[in-house]
Amino acid sequence: MAGVTGVGMSISGIAQAQVIAMPGTTTGKSIASESRSDARKTKKTKTEKKEINPASETIVVIGTHLGTKATEEIQPVALITGQQIQQSSAMTMGEVFQNIPAMGFTGSAPSNAAGSCVSLHNLGVERTLVLVDGHRVISGGTGATVAGCVDMNTISPDMVSSVQILKDGSSTNYGSDAIAGVVNVSLKHDFTGTTITGNGGISQRGDASNSVLAISHGENFWNGRGNISLSGSFSNQDPLEQKNRKWARENVNCSDPPAGQSATNCGYTSFSSAGLLWAANGSPSLRPAGGQSNPTGQALTPDGGGGLRFEQPGDYYQQWTDTNIIQPQRKGSLSGSAHLDVTDDLQLYIDGMWSKTTSQASVGTATVSTMPTRLVGLSNTIIVPKGNPYAENLGINQDVRLYKAWDDLGKEYNNFTNDMYQVTTGARGTLSFARDWNYDIFYSYGKYVGSQDDSNHINMENLERSLGFKWMPGQAAGGTLGTFDPTVCTNSPGCSLINPFSNSLTSQQKNYIGYTKSITSGFEMRDVQATVSNKHLAKLPYGALGIALGVEHRSYDGFYHVGPVASQGLDGEGSTSSFSGGYNATEAFGEISAPLLRGLRGAESLAAEASGRYSHYNNFGDAFTWHAGLLYSPVKGISFRANMSTSFRAGSLSDLYYGQTQFTYTNANFDPCVNPTNPVVYANCVKSGVKNPESYKEPGNQYRVISGGNPKLMPETARTFVIGTILQPEFIKGLSVTVDYWHTTMFDTVGKINLQSYVQNCFASQNLSGPSCSVYNGRDNSGQLLPLTYLETNVGEMKTSGLDIAGSYTRPLTYLDSLIFSADIQRTLTFKEQNNGNLFTNYLGTSASPNPRWLAVASAAWRHGRWTVQYGMQFIDSLTYENEYLYDKDAYKGFNMVFYHNIGVTYSGDKYTVTFGVKNLGDKDPLYYPLSTTGTNPSVYDVRGRYFYLKGQVHF
């Protein structure tokens, strides 16, 4: 729920589900009825035709394969209708979910390269399962990442019939990934006619504009026995440049702020266009002949007159001049569906969706400094060697380290292209030979391909050749000892010596030093499922016993490919290896539901349901999950529900197979063999190759680390219970309130260990035999630790709990007038994480994640005939900065609470609807975040400022 929500979108409890009640739309039970009538209906048996009202039995609700009337309220489900989406300010499906407190922070209003993903109760996008029409959707990412979440913006809002949000673990019905809950998007399938939708918005400052055009058309055929619907949309997001917001461009040098000035923003870089220079090995101090020296460690820089001077704040490259807060993006999407009632007992259907997204991230000017790899034959720091003629011209007669922003190479741009498509086909209906049994069999195939091309990167190996630096053999990998030898350049085709202290590279030199970094990733999903169900298996005293049974088989395959320069780490960003891998799962599941009491004094109704799923994965083995729920209504107008469930998440392709990346971890006093006092540690240090621990000194404060996926991961598991109440008092017509308490405990969460803690625990174990020694790989001849293993692992536990509170009240005034009030509140009570078996860390109310205690949206609307005037408010609670800040820390210990205000006006004609509104009416600037390159957290606070939008829809 980042930034500013849509006007008036909040949750209201009703009998069928919690409805996201938006001003100007129908609320209450009529919405649930509308959503039912729009759904595709399977043909009923002869018995059903005689005895059953289809409208009361075909229920749009997730978390169950039965959906019977008696048990539909057991699980906490929120509902959004397509009509509500159109009348809101949301232009994409991603923006729809930003209006729901239970979704936490899903990114700023316009999504960037990775798309817009959803995360229930802030448990992570990887733990919220996304479905379309009850079917899994292929996950996506960017060219630089692997599949991790479903981009909601690949779904056109124009074709959405409704959205259901299950805020409870549901692995029994859907399998892996549903730890936090499930989001199901139901598309329109009996759509007829043509609908054209156009949306547009722009900030008060004339930037960050967004536009969407969508066209949908549907036709019935074969005398109404079939229907085909098609939809296409195109959206364009213009950038928001960082230099165009005052709060984002006030950058100073954090490591050395000017006297009397606090560090207000850390978006600076330690580079300059002319270059900042230090002695190559830290000492002796840099002493150019006839120039100044830097005994205090302050950098020197060319003065433009043939000499050197001390660095000044103005020398530093200000990154905000070249970067965007919101990246430009274009997206095209197509979707279609068709179904045909072949007989009264058989319906064939096919659904398809495709999207293509292109976006560009402006990274800024290419820079050089320290390389995070340690490869034999390549220095770990860019060195201008003694003897370089351009250094001698400045009076420099020793090796110097170079920190430089290379302006004449041009800006670095990361260009992303993401393609995805998915096709689902199946058959559903009734078994003519078996009374009351329904079936659904489908096969789904999805594919995602992402590419990333990063322009104007620097090939560090070619740069060292262009400086004439020849690495001296015999030293540890990545050592900085070398000599000036121009032949290392002249012997390399295309190389010529460059002047590192100017910005006058020739085209040939640019082509030799610079290159385009390319990354490609792709993923495939195959899913086949067969389900049978019977809502009237047996007659009980107070209703019918329902049962559903099914089997499912899914497989996932993926790859990640990087070019040779990046794979060796020659671009200074760490060596990264390509990978390919996959896994599959075979599952069986079942569900029963039963009404236990009805129409008794003190027991208006009592119903129960239970479900279970057995899963076999070919990589980690077996898993079993279960769910049990109970619904009790003592009298009409009030119900109580309780749910308990277990769930799990199998490791993603990224978690399991991500290619190994080698980088440098910087941390002083990291090595436990520096003057150890523990006798066990002392003995282990000697055993590891440190002969005299009492006098041992770290070779440096940089350590090589190997990061990547871990195919030995075990799945995350979770236990969740939810208790709640639903209030619809008959003596207050139009009032609906739901309150649900949820508590989730996760085990074996996947993440990164505390590397230093693991190394220290390893050396404190007998004979280096402790479990923490999995990261330790020995030492080289100099005593330096060999690359440490830093793979994904099952690190510990997570505990979170809270309250979801929602309500709405509709007050008719006259035949034409009514008032509608609604609110949706999330109160997080606990959010704790445990790592490496240590004590739990409390992240509640901190900027880590982030985790505010309170999140809320509220709305009020006046509806007069065809007109609706609406007001909306969003509240984000205050946060505490998770770490003390280095400078002026008292000023950054917390962030104030924030209120955003929005207004909108809607006119609904017979064939068209027009909405105009203003978001962030008060033009409130985002709050400052320390150590942020933009000065704030765009996933939490609105960055566009006051924003105007206009949207319209016409149907014919």
Image: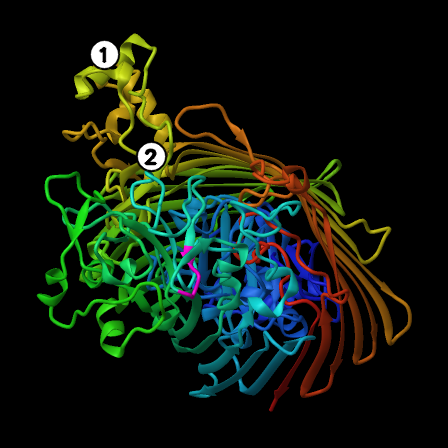
Task: Locate the C terminus by quadrant.
Answer: bottom right
| Along the viewing direction, whichever of 398 and 514 lies nearer the viewer | 398
Task: Locate the N terminus by quadrant.
Answer: bottom right
Q: What span is colored magenta in the figure?
A: 301-305
Pointer 2: residues within 10 angstroms few (<14), some, or many (20+)? few
Residue type highlighted by circle 2: Asn
Q: Is residue 703 left or right of residue 271?
A: left
Secondary structure that dominates the magenta span = loop
| Along the viewing direction, whichever of 482 and 389 lies nearer the viewer | 389
Front of the two marks 2 and 1: 2
State the residue position of label 1. 683
Whether residue 680 is situated above or below residue 853 in the rendered picture: above
Give the residue displayed 29% in from the left and 51% down from the top: 653
Observer able to see residue 266: yes
Q: Position of residue 198 (x, y in %)?
A: 59, 84
Q: Is residue 827 left or right of residue 338?
A: right
